[in-house]
Image: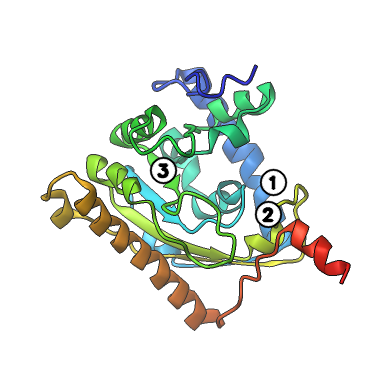
Amino acid sequence: MNNIGTGKNFPRENPGLFDRALCYIMVNFTIIPTIQIFMNLLNRTRIIGRKNLAGLKPPWILMSNHLTLLDDLFIDPLIFFPKGFLGYRYIPYHAPEEKNFYKHAITSWLMRRLKSIPVIRGRGIQQEGVNRLISAVKRGGILHIYPEGTRTRNGQIGAAKDGIARIVYETGAPVVPVYHQGLEKVLPIGSAIPNFGKEIRIAIGRPLSFQRELEMENDINTWRLITNRIMDGIREQQRVMNERWGARSTGIRTVKTIKQSSKC
């Protein structure tokens, strides 16, 4: 039984020393070294804007565009390295879609111990998973989440879900906008095996604060102002990236599309 929708897949809100230590060891001594090798040796990754994270302490939220099912796994070990070594609170929370990542006992066990708080697509911004994400940030956590809510199917930055701003409004945390490109070629939609020899680009923006918006009503109109600023920040990082390295088409193609085109 996968326990999807039962609430049993939520991690402990206040994990004990053993769970914290286990997470710290798995992330810093297993996941980060593995992904560093994959992203920097088996592929080529360029990053600009690291200086924008200098001196930034939790709580804060990273919001980026969304290309693959495993964006967090591929880019977070690069963005948060080496700050993750400073302690458990510097390891980010994630918001995986529960139906995708909690189908099996082993993956469910891992996700609960790697600071993952599942959400269920279609249940809205008031669902328990979102409440727990807000609570995690309020307790001083870092969160990586996608304002579009789902992966792009055409390579373009999509429209944000206005409700994602509820997390920003109710935590008061700054948001770091990030744009990345290239992972759509590393793990095309429909593929289970990553590709090698690809170029990945990541642009990290300056933290955005929302003091003016936080003085407004906590409603959809204010949320829309917040999400508009966040998406403008992500698009700005796309512009910065293009100026630095030149514009490049994301060229998103699903595995199904590739197979069909090969028959033509």
Res 176 → quadrant? bottom left
Disc count in the image?
A: 3
Q: Nearer the viewer, mark 3 or mark 2?
A: 2
Please state which amino acid type lies under the numbered disc 3.
Answer: Leu
Which residue carries the number 2 mark?
189
Q: CA distance from mark 3 to mark 1?
A: 22 Å
Could you tell me if residue 54 is visible in this image? no
Q: Is 168 or 43 nearer to us in this picture?
A: 168
Residue 235 as seen in the image, left or right of residue 23 = left
Q: CA distance from mark 3 to mark 2?
A: 24 Å
Circle 3: is it few (<14), some (14-19), or many (20+) Cα within 10 Å? many
Sooner in the amino-acid sequence: mark 3 or mark 1 = 1
Sooner in the amino-acid sequence: mark 1 or mark 2 = 1
Q: Is 13 or 223 nearer to us in this picture?
A: 223
Which residue carries the number 3 mark?
143
Q: Quadrant of the C terminus?
A: bottom right
Which residue carries the number 1 mark?
34
Q: Position of residue 253 (x, y in %)?
A: 70, 64
Q: Quadrant of the N terminus?
A: top right
Q: Nearer the viewer, mark 1 or mark 2?
A: 2
Residue 161 as seen in the image, left or right of residue 156 = left
Q: Are marks 3 and 2 in contact (CB under 8 Å)?
A: no
Please state which amino acid type lies under the numbered disc 1.
Answer: Thr
Asked which colour scheme the image uses, the reply is rainbow
Sooner in the amino-acid sequence: mark 3 or mark 2 = 3
